[in-house]
Image: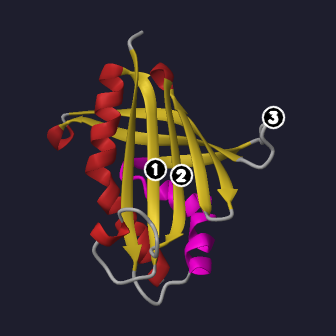
Amino acid sequence: MFSSTATLRHITRLPPPITFDEAILRLHNHELLIKFDPEYTSHEELAADPANPDAKRYKVTDNLKALPAGLWNTQITFEAELTDTKDGVNWVIKAPLGLVQKTSWRCVKVDGMEGASEVEGEGEWCLVEDVEITANRMLVTHVKGKCEENWRGTHGKFLESLKA
């Protein structure tokens, strides 16, 4: 019903002396990435899908705040499929109401990357997050807004994990 798609791109420079290998090690730590979600409540690993044996599957529960000050919260459970790639990780989230969100987090060298000069920082590597959200228009608008609201905090948690 009135299906729509939105795409987003968020780029964060990785501070020196962070290396490609250090970033990839964190990107391949699915449990760490899942917990970066600001609305994260819990997760559990699911059995592999024989159609995509390279992917790890998780059931994730988030606590969504529908109204400010906790006046109306709701829990939502969805399936997340994470597949490691040579330069990062691909996510596919399948949530209620037909929402499908495909996200890639990649570690990309700044030199020659389009748009990298506009990103603050000094590192030679960037975390590049590309998101595609498909659902009904109202839901796409809401999820896109949440992604825009939360990406800096999520990328910040990723940077903190690199310092640990």
Q: Sequence-wise, which precedes: disc 1 or disc 3?
A: 3
Q: Residue at x 35, y 63 (%)?
A: 115
Amino acid type at circle 1 is Asp
Label 2 close to label 1 by CB (< 8 Å): yes
Residue 130, numbered circle = 1
Please name the amino acid that badge 3 sits on. Answer: Ala
Q: Which residues are magenta?
A: 20-40
* Viewer-proximal residue among 41 and 2: 2
Q: Secondary structure at mark 3?
A: loop
Tag 3 and tag 2, C-beta contact below 8 Å: no
Q: Residues within 10 Å of mark 1 (few under 14, many from 20)?
A: some
Task: Say above or below: 152 vs 65.
Answer: below
| Residue bearing the label numbered 2 | 104
Is residue 23 in the magenta section? yes
Q: Residue furthest left?
A: 69
Do labels 1 and 3 touch, CB within 8 Å?
no
Amino acid marked by disc 2: Ser
- Residue 14 falls left or right of residue 69: right
| Residue 142 pos. (x, y %) | 29, 32
